[in-house]
Image (cartoon, rainbow, N blue to C red):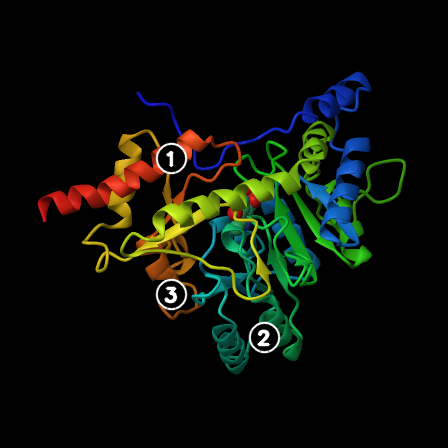
Amino acid sequence: MKPKIWLSSPHMGGEEFSFVKEAFDTNWIAPLGPHVNGFEHDLEAFTGSKYAAALSSGTAALHLGLILLGVGPGDEVICQSFTFSATANPIVYLGATPVFVDSESQTWNMCPELLELAIKDRIAKGKKPKAIMPVHLYGMPAKMEQIIKIAQRYNIPVLEDAAEALGSTINGKKAGTFGAMGVLSFNGNKIITTSGGGALISDQEKFILQARYLATQARDKAPHYQHSQIGYNYRLSNVSAGIGRGQMQVLTDRIKQRRSIFEFYLKNLAGLPGIDFLREPEGHFSNRWLTAITIDPDKADNITRETLRLLLEEENIESRPLWKPMHLQPVFKNHPSYINGISEKLFNNGLCLPSGSNLTQESLERVIRIITSAYKKKSAFA
Ligand SMILES: *Cc1c(COP(=O)(O)O)cnc(C)c1O
């Protein structure tokens, strides 16, 4: 068996273990402690957001974000259809209904025109959406300036899913800082990891104070356990936060490494017929969490993304189709959706290539070799 090449695997920088050791040495083995506070400060400094709450996952952060925007049973929330299910699930946890909006082709994220159409239609149907959830997929920031303008016009708050986009920017402003709140994830496959974790960020202190309160079982100030609200156990552990503090020291390098992997694939594959890459629109800077290509079978001699995925799999190389849109998921297929066909086409033709910052040059060359061999095989039969 050839050595495994992963899509995106954890990449420690070196200092993580000394932070974790410090947690052990001082017996701060709890879902609070100095590393949690330190990690929140690191996130605030890096993102430029005034406040951050370190939480147990990105999904937990999305759930709390929706609660803080007052989403409850019977409400509707507009959600990007082209995303991971974790964006949409918390809407349903709250008894609300996701209303899905399709993507545009420049960023692959929420289409502003379709968003406005959806808002108008929901209002005409008698229900104004309670929140808007754009996503910055694969690190590419959505068209936030336009989305925020529309959100303001209708006075609907924005909860940004920046789980894949830590360090991405639009005109220098960090993804996750455009809306009322932003969500980050530190799952094992993300650009940095705490082994599992997430954060809610905001410029509004009340949101973050409330998030920390809800995340620690909503305890009122009293010597006994007293509760006036339903709480959650969503705080990040001090041990995990120690990993996060070490990872923050190398985040800028990780972004550089992921971007240079994108450039390498671009240089070596962009000439192949039918293969295309997502470019950065003017002002947009992507952390290039994952490099994704699209393969147009009509131009690629009938090579499809599945041809390439299976060839890579035979060589013990992990690649993955792009996210299957929520409006096509069995669990969500009956929800209202505003669709233009773009995300479905991306799902049919798109493939994420191994993009971990710890990939060796040799591994990247192996990936290139397999993909180019698909074309050679084809021309041998031609
Ligand atoms: C990873 C991810 C999440 C969820 O984050 P977890 O920390 O795994 O809960 C949410 N949205 C998107 C787009 C993601 O990629």
The amino acid sitting under disc 3 is Ile
Quadrant in which residue 221 is drawn: top right
Residue farthest toward the bottom in the current orientation of the protein: 124
Residue under pointer 2: 128
Residue drawn 41% across and 50% down? 266
Q: Is residue 96 left or right of residue 14?
A: left
The total number of labels drawn is 3
* Local crowd size for mark 1, using a 10 Å CA cut-off: few (<14), some (14–19), many (≥20): some
* Residue topped by disc 3: 342
Alpha carbon distance from label 2 to label 1? 51 Å
Q: Position of residue 249 (x, y in %)?
A: 71, 35
Tag 1 residue: 365
What's under tag 1, amino acid-wise?
Glu
* Of the pair 304 and 34, the residue shown nearer to us: 304
Of residues 144 and 73, the one drawn nearer to the viewer in this rendering: 144
Q: Residue at x 33, y 61 (%)?
A: 345
The answer for how far apart the CA atoms under marks 2 and 3 are is 25 Å
Q: Nearer the viewer, mark 2 or mark 3?
A: 3
For label 3, count other residues whose C-alpha is less than 10 Å away and answer few (under 14), some (14-19) or many (20+).
some
- Locate the N terminus by quadrant: top left
